[in-house]
Amino acid sequence: MTAFEADLVERDPDESAATRIARGLGRAPVHLVLVVIGLLWLVPTLGLLFTSILPASTFSSAGWWKIFSKPSEATWSNYVNLFHDSTLMHALLTTAEIAIGGTVLPIFVAAGAGYALAWMEFPGRDWLFLGVIALLVVPLQMALIPVFHLYNTFHLYDTIFGLILFHTAFGLPFAIFLLRNFFIGIPKDILESARIDGASEIRIFLRLILPLGTPAIASLAIFQFLWTWNDLLVALTMARNTQPLTVAIFSNLRQFGSNIDLIAPAAFFSLAIPLAVFLAFQRYFAEGLLAGSVK
């Protein structure tokens, strides 16, 4: 008997094996549908992967499914050429700088603001929090032209720092909202005990709030990193020569028929990085999504 079956017997010793089997068979259609949906959802990703390891001539003449009939045609030379392409590698480095800066900076600012809005008393605190909530509904597209003129005035246009600031500004409302709701769920007794022991607000923030807020911070980091890494619209508007990987791939689409062997591996590599980040922090993801929802 497996551990799972033993657990079922322990929870309900009067339930027969036939009943458990019947219940499992009753759920089988639902599980089957979910598996089919999952496989269909993976088809575009698998198609991109197979395209990235096929010669351009094979893809043009037969499609990526040719790999099932002739797996010997698969080659990693496309990825070798990708890593030797100076333009795309520079774009990859630029993307990493923007994504890391656009993730760390808003989390740092939002963590302090979230703690202040949750546990520090000052005039207008509730109104300030309402203002943060109101900023959540401001569409990014509405601010592109005003910020564009502002960037030209302060010479931030076409700079990595300017793109980081843009992502920080539009990521802060959600970040503050999420972290404040998580921090306010921390038991008040812990903070009061620390204050009685003589701990300053900064020490409480660094030694108590940040460690206890790790699930929400990690979840926020996933959201912010995915947004900044996959951004295309802001980079197209706020930069010309400072091109992240999404813009570099978009620029190569003009010659899609002739350089698919370069675009496909670049696109899949761009997809694999945020997927790896998500898998690394997935154990915190559910806790972060539920931050502040239950007290």
Image (cartoon, helix red, strand yellow):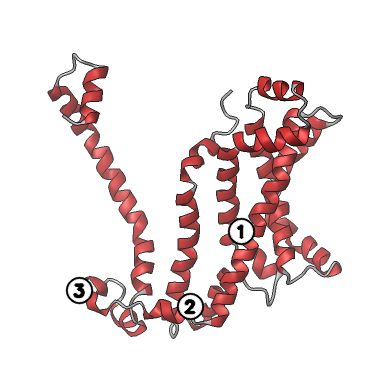
Percent from the top left, x then y, of residue 246?
56, 69
In this view, 28 is above or below 248: above
Mark 3 falls on what kind of element?
Answer: helix
Q: Which mark is residue 69?
A: 3
Residue at coordinates 70% horizontally, 54% vertically from top-left?
Answer: 168
Image vertical order of residue 272 relative to residue 213, above or below: below
* Upstream in sequence: badge 1 or badge 2: 2
Question: Furthest residue to the top?
Answer: 14
Q: Amino acid at mark 3?
A: Ser
> Could you give the CA–CA distance between mark 1 and mark 3, rounded to whole angstroms?
39 Å
Crowding at mark 2 (Cα within 10 Å: few <14, some 14-19, many 20+): some
Q: As drawn, which residue projects farthest toward the left?
A: 18
Direction from residue 122 to residue 192 in the image, left or right: left
Q: Horizontal and vertical percent for residue 138?
A: 71, 48
- Say which of marks 1 and 3 sits in front: 1
Quadrant containing the C terminus is top right
Looking at the image, how many numbered discs can be counted on the residues?
A: 3
Q: Residues within 10 Å of mark 1 (few under 14, many from 20)?
A: many
Residues 194 and 10: in front is: 194
> What residue appears at the point 16 percent right and 23 percent down from the top-left corner?
19
Q: The disc labelled 1 sits on which kind of residue?
A: Thr
Label 1 SS = helix
- The answer, for residue 136, to whether it is visible in the render is no
- Give the vertical position of 228 relative to 16 (above or below): below
State which quarter of the image contains the N terminus.
top left
Q: Would you identify the image quadrant in which residue 161 lies?
A: bottom right
Disc 2: which residue: 83
Which of the marked residues, 1 or 3, is nearer the chain's N terminus? 3
Q: Look at the numbered disc 2 and give the secondary structure of its residue.
A: helix
Q: Which mark is residue 228?
A: 1
